[in-house]
Structure formats: structure tokens, C-alpha cells
Amino acid sequence: MTWFTKWALRNRAALVFSVIASLIFGIFSYTNIPMELMPSADQPYVTISVVGNGMDAVSMDEQVTQPIEKVLTGIKGKRNVVAETGNNFSQMTVTFESGTNLKEAKQQIQENISTVNLPPGVMKPYVVLLNTSQIPVVYIGLSFDQEIGNRELNLVENEILPMLKDINGVGNVMTYGGKDQQVMIKVDPAKLAAAKISLEKLYTILQGRNASVAVGEQTLENEATSIIVTGKMESLEDVQNLQLNAATKLKDIADVTMEKDTTSITHMNGKNFIEVIAQKDSTSNAVTVGKGVADAAKKINEDYKGTLTATVFINLADTVLDSINSMTREVLTGALFATLIIWLFLKSFRMTLITIVSIPLSLCITMILLSFFGVTLNILTLGGIAVSVGRLVDDSIVVVENIYRRKRGNELTPAFIVEAVKEVAAAITSSTLTTVAVFLPMMLASGSLRDLIAPFAITITCSLLSSLLVSLTVVPALSGRMMKKVKVKEHKNDSFYPSVLRWSLNHKWLPILISVVVVISSIGLFATMPKGSVDQKDSAYISLLLRYQNGTPFKDIEGGLKRMETILSKADGVKNNIVQVGNNADAAQFGELQDANQVQFMVFLKEGADSAKIVQDLRKEKDQFPGAELTASTAGLMGENTTKVSVDVIGKNEDDIKSAADKIKKKFTSIDGVQKVETNDEDKKPTVTITVNPTLSNAQEIAQSLHSMIDPAVIGSVKIDGRTTIVKLGALKEIKTAEDLKQLQLMTPDGPVQLSKIAKIETSNQPGTLYSKDGHHYLQVSAAVDPKKMVDVTGEIKKQLVVWEKDNTFGDETSAEITGSAMQSSDDLQELAKLALFSIGIVFMILLVTLKSFRASIAILLTLPLAAIGSLLGLVVSKSSIDISSGIGMLMLVGIVVTNAIVLVDRIRHNETSMTIREAIMEAGSVRLRPILMTALATVFAMVPLLFTHESGMSMNLVSKGLAVVVIFGLIVSTLLTLIVIPTFYELFHFRKVKKQKLSSSAISSELM
């Protein structure tokens, strides 16, 4: 590796140019790398959303859900299909095994679904694969000073959306809410009968009215001329004046009005609004796009003042900028701390400057490499820089310290510098490569975990290799220039450490005992510690849900919605609120269908507002909503800040499924860490079943007649205000009770007949929503869990499920399994454990190659259990759990902690050529003590700012306090123990050679005497 040093010393002009170019292009790359909140990562599931047209849950299940489930059986990599079917909607979630190509899977799902024949009126299914890169950058609410009609919708589509789409970097703009108006025809049965007009004629009144038909081509006035017959209806008056017969117009027998969709509501601050969602393209900067859209919103408010108001309620540009600025501050603060530590040890401004030059230069080279690899600047890549900034000076510290130590009495010639660098080149190269070897396997992780941590690993790898290159080139060249005037101070030999080291070597039983105790303690501590998921403490908004009983009249739900809007309008700290009720095509395209009996609020707060207090205050309002369950919680980009463990119970017998679910629910309530337990079958809906006597009438004909009489039916469309507007024929008979149904008169070929005469009418309570998994109905038991105890609760349930399965508690045809985020957290921790083992193997191989000694390599690996106890104690002290963040920190430790051991052992092996093993150990300990402490403390203090970093509610905090705690405590403990334990075991592994050297030394002493 000294080739780099020789080149740098021989080509100073080229080196200076390379440094300047690296700084310029590094800064340029930093300003041009796309900024995002998160790396691009596919979620491991695909949602299929379907909206029906007035179909009940049972019909949707039989005619929509089940046919789609059947065509999904052959999808490659599919783990399971979970379906939720309710009145007017069906939503299926297809989860996949790790490593599945989700884009190909989505394409296959779309192709298979296209072969399903869905009932008339059921909209085309939306197949959605969510990716973090598709996270919308800006959400804008457009509210109008009047009711939203066709003209307002045209204004948005024809003027507002094009304005937003023209912004540089905007990839897609979508709208939500602001439903199209519809023409409703409400017939007066008496007037209809008096006009002697049949109901069938009403169903055909629009046929052919809107048409454009080419009837052929004729020669007119010696020119070939096309003849086209057209018919246009362009206003509500045109529909009202439709001529039904010579004496009757439609308005004579019916009220014809324009009305809005009354099955769904979307409000912002109590008003109907249109939500506009802007996404960036794949190459653009989220910050630039967000600012551009925000500026466009201001211009909209100026240009359309008095017509509409544009309110930006989410702008990820602000979040990205805040997160990046916050992480940048951590990097700079960490670099400052590392610099202070170096100066305190070296007590020389020149030497400190030589050392810390590796930080900005390494970071600039890293930025160039990230730009080359196409890695975006996001909270994880910046986190990678933050956790490696202290490590960037390690190699330079060792090089500078060795040159300084050897300078005494020597001239700083190129040959001297090369020789000084050569002495430590193998050690710093080996230590850097071992650290890199830990991070590169992160890219072997599977699924979305790989997508998230791969950019993190690439960033650290690039920064460490850059720092190694700088330490071998720029640092020696600067040392040759700047150290000439540095006076070498007499180094005061520290008597404490050599004394402790000599005593430990003479009493090896104590270090060995300490090591055994440490290993056993680490295992025991790990087993007893809580293991959870990343705890999202901060919040981006408050998620508020009102859940009514199935069958609650829509007017009651709307009343509760307005009552909550009034409460929110008076609440301190609330800035904006958005509410959604019901299902429609807009919700389906985002995979966000829900029961019609649910009212979902997103409450956005003013800056500085106490979200936890507001949540508590809102929960106290539950008494104002009788008949509804009120839940409120803070939420972030990934949804509510609640952690759930779910168990799915599958079987063929409904009673057995219910019994098993009750047992699981009871078990959940007894586990420590479980906060709330619920099942998905607790809501029933009143159902009227009409059983037609097949000998008296046809069930299908009766169903069609009933549908036409009691439900509005689409009979065509017209173009009003430039928009295609559907026309519905209103219900001919208003039904309020089951008795009304019995008395209903139906027209049959034999004349009018009362429904109760030809059918049996029964009322019962049935599930308002049907749940199925892989084609079988199931129940799900969900428990809200303390995030720190997620894995513990999951493990307890797993053990109990095994016992129940062994005892056949649920029966032969009923089974239960853990699903959802609990399974994902466990899978991710297991994945990290496998990566850690793989990384340890690679590190051991590198040590064998560089040190060429099996025993020396084993001695170095002993640092790992020493680091483990430190990191676990750190988690205990900080009251943190073992989660993905701390797991990544432990993986990092594998590469970081061996660095000090490599530097120490390399010096010992270098000394063995001229000294006994005991002398080599003592000399290496004295010489390497200062660089080891410097590098360790520089890394520790560089990571201290991460302990206090702000955890954004709009991101997954994989680089957070847990990671910093693990690295800081693990490195401190391992460094202290390494200085004693590693030399002890090194000498122990060479006990025969040591014994021979002692005997030889004794013999020589005897001869001299």
C-alpha cells in the first residue's frame, strides 16, 4: 500500500490538483445529488382495491373477492392473500416472500385479474405497489367559496393541474375528493301512472339522445361529403325537457335535480375540498420540487382570489430539508468533537490540521462516489456519514502519530516518511478493509430491508475507503511539509498502563475469568432484554378515528363528523384537519378503502404544539360520540405510531375459529407489554334475507325488480358544463322498515303481487365486513404493544401457539399464525443476525490473509464479545430495546472494534522479529496506547451528537439513538478491555514459545551470573 505514498511524494503538483478537484467536484456533487427523505424501497405487498355499486358485503365477497382470489393462486413468490370485503368495497393485500421481484409480481397480478368477469357497475380493480420513491412530495387542499360542482372541477383539471404539472421535476399530479355531480330523477309514481308511461320507458329515455353516428358518404355539389347525425344534451334543462310522449315531459312526472355523491365525504377544516397530490420524477430533487409546488400554491391564491384557496398541509421538502440539515449538523458537530480530542492528545495545531484534513476531503470524495453510484442524499445516507465521521480520522491518526513518534532525531525525507507509513500501512489497511467487509454484506439482505440499508452501507464503504486513500497520500505529503517545524516533545512514559498490563500477563487467570464472565453476561443480558421495533416518537400529524357500528345511518355518521370538526376548530394547536368517509375510486387508487362506518381524520398541528397532550385531550371527548368508538394517536409517514402484533385464525368451521380467537385474545391480555386487544369480528350489521319461493317466482327477477324500486339506478349520462355526468333514476319506493318490504307491491307477468306472498322475509345480524385469507374466512386478533417489547410479545405468542398446536387445542381444521409488523420485525432482526455472522466470517478471512496467523486472528476476534457487553449495557442504561436501529449498530461494531486490536497485534507481530513475545507485547502496548485511545475517543465523541438527534415523524429512524448508544458504549468497553485481554490471550496462544523464551532468558541470566 506504500505505492500510493510514494506516488504522492513524487507527484506533489498532481496531488495538489487532485485535492482541489476533489473538493470542487465533491461540493458540486453535494449540491446536485437528488435529495429524498428515504431511499427507494418497495413495500413487500401489493394491494388490490375494488369499489362496487351498491353491492352488499356478501355479494361483493361471492362475485368479486372470491373470483379474484382464485386467479391469484399461481402468483410467483406469493406468501398469502388477505381480503377485507364490506358493503360496496373489497380490498385484498398480497404479501410476498423476501427477494421476490415485486414489479413483476404486480404485472402478473394485473394480467390475471384482467381475465375475471366482474358484475356490472363494479369498477376496474386498482393494483397498487407502494414504493418510498412514490411518496408524494406535496399535498395541497383546494377549497372553494361555494359548493364544488362541475365548473369547479373543470377549473381544477383544466387550469390548476396543468400549472402544477409544468413545474420542473414534477412527475405526476393526482386529485382526491371533489366528486362529480350527478343528475337525479325522482319519479312521482302517481303522475307516472296518470301519464300512462311504463317504468321500462324511463330506463330507456336517454338511449340515443347523446350520439354521434356517421351514416355514410355522399356526393353533394360534386364533392365527397360525410354525413353525421349527432344529438347533444348539455344542460339540466335539456334533461328536464325530455319529451316522453306527445303531452308529457320528464319534468312533468319527476323532479330532475343536480346533486352530489352522498355516499362519501372529504372535508378540510369543515369544507368540501379537492386534495391535489404532487409526486416528483425519479431523477429530481424533492426539496426543489417541494419549493416549486409551494410557490405555485401561493400564485394560485393570488390568481384565483375569491374563487378558491390553496392550502399546503404536507410538504416533504421541508421535512427533507430539516432532516438533512439536522443530520448535517450532527456530522459537523461530530467532526468538531473528533478534532478537539485529537488536539487534546497531540497538543499541536499543525498535527491536528494534518489529521483532520481527511474529514472534508474524504467526505467530498464520498459525495463524488455517491453521485457515480446513483445514490441519493437522504436521511440514511447522511446517517451513514454521521456514524463514520469519527472513523474517517482513524487511519490518519495512526499515520501522523507514527511519523511524529519516529521523527525524533530524523530528517523528514521522502524515504523516511515512506518507511514510517510502511510500518503502519498493513494495520490501517487491514482495519479499514475489515470495517468495509462488515458493511458490504448489508447489500445481501433481502427485500425492503436491503433497499433501506444498502445505500447506508455504500455510503460508509465509500467514506472509509476514501479516508484510507487520504491517509496514505495526502497525510504523508502534508506531514513532510508541516512537521518540519514541529518540535518533538519528550514522551512521558505512562507507568500505570504498563504496570497493569504486566500484572495481567503474570496473572492470566483474571483476564480470562473476566472474558468468560463477559461472554456469559452478554448472552444472558441479550436473552432477557426487550426486543422491539423502531419506536417512532415524533409525530407528523394526529390520526383520529370514529368507528360506528355497522348499520349506523349515514346521517348519524355525518353528524358525528361535524361534531368532531367543531371540536378541532376550537382546539389549541390544531392548524388543519382533513376527514374522509366512505369509499370511491379516488381512495381505491391509493389502496385506502375502508368501512363506510369509519370516519378517519388527519389532524395537522401548529409548530411547537404538544401532540401527546392534544391526543389526550381528544380522547377525553369520547362521551360526545355515543355509538362510536373514538381512538386517537400520533402518526408519521408510515402511519400511526402504534405497534401491533396480529394473529390470524383460519379454519372451516366458524364456531371453531371464534373459539380459537377467544383463547388467543385471553392469552394476549395476560402478556406484559400488551396495551389493547381487539378482533375483527366484533361488529355486526342488521341484514334482511328475502327467500323467494321458487314455485311462485324467479329469485333473480325479484332481485332486479327490488333493486329498481328501492335503489337509484344509473340510466345513462349527459354532458353538463363540459363534463360527462351520470344520470340516475331515483328509488320509486322509500323503505324504512322490514315491514315496508313485506308490504311492497311488485309487478309480475300475472299482475301486481305483495312481496310477502311470494317470499319469506327474515331479519338477522350478520358480520358487516367479511375477512378471508387464501380463500378461507378467518378472524384476526390484534394487540397494540409497547414497541420496546414487540419481539418479546411475539416470542411469547409463538411459544403458546406451538403448545396449542401440539395439544390440538383448536381442532384439526383450525390453525393460527402470527402476521403483520411483528413478523416483519422478527424477520429483520434475524436477517441482521445472519449478516453479522457472515460479516464475522469475512473479517476473520481478511485477518488471516493480512496477519498470516490463525492465533493472532483469533485473539483479535475476542474483541467482539467484549464489545457486545458494552453495547447491551448501553441499551440498559439508556432504557432502549434491541431493534433494527440498534441491530445495525451491533453490526457496525463488528468492523469498528477490531480496528484497535489490529493496530495493537500488528505492532506486536512486528516487534517479534527482534524481541521476545513479552517484550513485544509491552512495547506495543506502550507505543500503541495513544493512537488507540485517540481513534476510539474520536469515534465515540463524533457519534455523541446522534444521541440527541431529532427523530422525524416523517421517516423511519434507522439511524437514531439506539445505533449511537450501541456503538458508543460498545466501543468504550471493548477498547478498555482490549488493552488488557487481547495481549493476555495473545501470549496465552503462544505459551510454548513464551515458555521457551523464558527458559532461554533464565539460562542466559545464569551464565552471566
Image: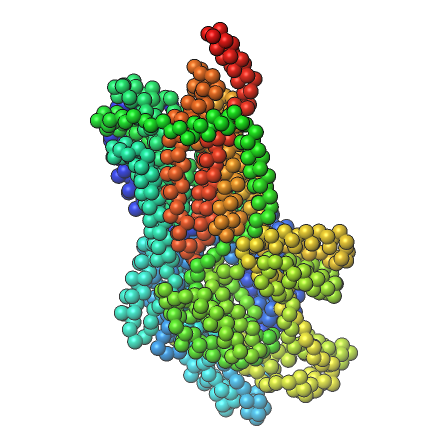
- Quick check: 462 above or below 140? above
Residue 826, image x, y percentages: 58, 49
Residue closer to the observer: 339 or 68: 339
> Furthest-top residue in view?
1007
Give the vertical position of 559 relative to 950 (above or below).
below
Task: Decide if residue 168 is in sight here.
Answer: yes
Residue 330 in the image: state x and y as whole percent. Answer: 35, 47
Quadrant, the N terminus: top left
Which of 894 and 681 lies nearest the eye of the viewer? 894
Which residue is painted at 40% across and 32% down in the image?
A: 932
858 horizontally vs 385: left or right: right
Q: Nearer the viewer, residue 319 or 418?
A: 418
The vertical placement of 436 against 28, above or below, is above
Q: Residue furthest front?
A: 1009
Decide which of 79, 723 is in the foreground and name it: 79
Residue 231 visible (yes or no): no
Residue sitting at 48 percent across and 30 percent down?
980
At a point 35% along the width and 55% down the height, the residue shown is 322
Q: Position of residue 675 (x, y in %)?
A: 58, 62
Task: Tell me residue 937's x, y (percent).
Answer: 39, 38
Q: Please, which colouring scheme is shown?
A: rainbow
Left or right, residue 638 beside residue 73: left
Which residue is rendered at x = 55% and y = 23% of the image? 989
Number of labelled discs? 0
